[in-house]
Structure formats: C-alpha cells, structure tokens
Amino acid sequence: MFFMLRLSLIVATYNRSASLIRALESVAQQSAPASEWECVVINNNSTDDTQERFAEFVAAHPDLNMRMVTELRQGLSFARNRGIRESEAEYIAIIDDDERISPDFITSYISLFDSTPDAVAAGGPIVAEYPSGRPRWMSHFTERPIANTMYFGDKVREFPEGRIPGGGNMAMRRSAVRRYGVFDTSLGYVGESLVGGEECDLFERLRIAEAKYYYVPTAVMYHIIPPEKLTANYLSRLSYNIGVSQLRRALYYRRRARVRIKELFKWVVTLVLALWYFVTLQWSKAKYLLLMRYNITKGLWSK
C-alpha cells in the first residue's frame, strides 16, 4: 500500500540529550498516522550522549520514521537549513529540543495547509513550563524573550500585525522555502552564543512579499524553561544579544536610525511600567524589566 509523506518535522539539537528525548517522546505520541510524517533530528556537533540516546529511542519506536543527521557547521540556522534539505515532505514544521508538543501538533498543521491555500507559513500557541517554579520577578514583559509565550485565541486566524510564529513552533510549505529562502546563517544561536533573530529575518521576507502566515490554536508547544535560564546573568546576556540581532537586521535593511528611535520610545514605556511596579511594591519586576531594556539598548548600540 502506498502512503504519502505529508509533513517533515525538524528538530535541531546541541548537547541536550535528556531534553531531546523528552521532546521526542511527545513526537511519538502524535495523533497523525506515522505513515504521514517523518522526524529529522539534526545533531549540531553534540559532545554528550545525544547520538547514543537517540539510537536507543529509535530502536524502541521502530514504527516511527525518525533519523538523525549531523551538521558540522555550528549554529542553529545551519542545523535548521540542513534539516530542510534532508527532509522530503511538502509541509515542514520546526521545533526545538527543549520543548514538547501537543498530540495534534502535526495533524493541525497538515489540516491548515490542506484547507488554506494562501497559507505560506504558520505557527501556534507557546506555553511556558517552569519545573523549578516561575520566579516572582518575572512579568509578562520579561517572560517574552525567555519563553516567547504566545496565545491569540482559539480560532485559526492570520497572525496579528507585528507578531510572527515562534522559532520553536513554526511551519511552512516547502514552496515557501524555494521562493523566499532559508534561515540567514549570520543569525541564530551558535553553541552557547545567544544571538538569535533568524526567524524574524525569515518572516520579514515573507511580510515584505505580503505572504500570509496563520495562527493555528491546536498546534501547541510547551516550552520548558530550566532554572539556569531564570537568572539575572542569563536575562542580561539574552537581552544584549536580542539588541545585537536587531542591529544586524537593521543594518541589512538600512533602517538603523528608525530602529534606534523606536528603542528610545520603548524606554519611555519601560520607565512608566517600572514606576508602576515600584509603586505597587513589585520591586523585583521593576528591576528585571529595567535590566532587560538596558541590555537590549546596549546591544542595539554595540556598533
């Protein structure tokens, strides 16, 4: 009997074998028939036991179409681009190795692209999970860069103006890759470096081309945030590199002055919010909000 491969799920991984297996366990629970999808794991030069643990997982799930490919060029964008090249289906979904996905994740994206011809790309809700507990200093504003939480209701719709799918929960047609290109390898995490922005760059190209990308409420991703990402040092590093990424894209699109002026307006909003947190005795929220904004600005003015 002939079965058509509908969707390729791509997972890039680097030195997080335990997290990867946890992510793959959620992949193995998908409601979509196993004959309709494949999972391509891109090992980006891991030095831990990733390869061995993946082999054990595949041996325990012989009915699933899973394989691992090694990408020697270090960086998330290199890894994701390799996954796109190695995959075979017309629909592509991308997740990360520090998350788990809902059982209807794959089915939801297949249904969206089947039923919505003008959908070039898509994304779904992102729910943060904190195994060690959500810190008291975290506000909606400081949570976004760390967890990239996202929820736009329970209906399929186009993404709101100014918002794009999260990097760990996005899908696209292969034809979109052929037309608009892959991830910019000058952006995206490299090893322990936190310079991201590769998905922002990709969706900027789609926005300029007036391509449509949709929010799919049933394609849920749960982003698992470990305690080491809940420190002032991590938030400072992450925020600084967000600024660096914004600067690189601003230089490419020749809009550095506009982006920096916009950053100054964000400072006005930040100071108002920090004052409100201070008055309402939420001092730690004010402190971390200012820390985030300071480091984003520092990165944005790094050249």
Image (spheres, rainbow, N blue to C red):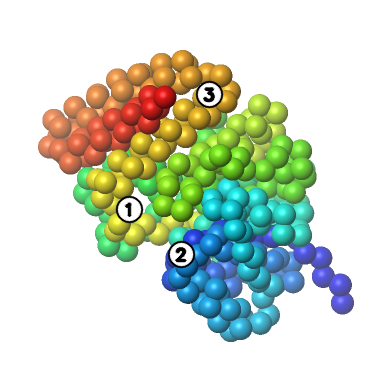
Q: Earlier in the sequence, mark 3 or mark 1?
A: 1
Residue 212, given in percent of the width and then of the height, sits at 68, 36
Tag 1: amino acid:
Lys
- State yes or no: discs 3 and 1 in contact (Cβ < 8 Å): no
Q: Which residue is mark 1?
A: 229
When the figure is inspected, residue 157 is found, relative to residue 131, above or below; the finding is above
Circle 2 Cα neighbour tier, 10 Å, few/some/many (<14 / 14–19 / ≥20) = some
Judged from the image, the secondary structure of the residue bearing numbered disc 3 is helix
Q: Earlier in the sequence, mark 3 or mark 2?
A: 2
Q: Which residue is mark 2?
A: 15
Q: Disc number at residue 112? A: none
Q: Earlier in the sequence, mark 1 or mark 2?
A: 2
Tell me, yes or no, if residue 251 can be seen here.
Answer: yes
The residue sitting at 58% across, 23% down in the picture is: 253
Judged from the image, the secondary structure of the residue bearing numbered disc 1 is helix
With 101 as the anchor, is 148 left or right in this view? left
Q: Which residue is mark 3?
A: 251
Judged from the image, the secondary structure of the residue bearing numbered disc 2 is loop
- Give the CA distance from mark 1 to mark 2: 16 Å
Of 183 and 213, the residue lying toward us: 183
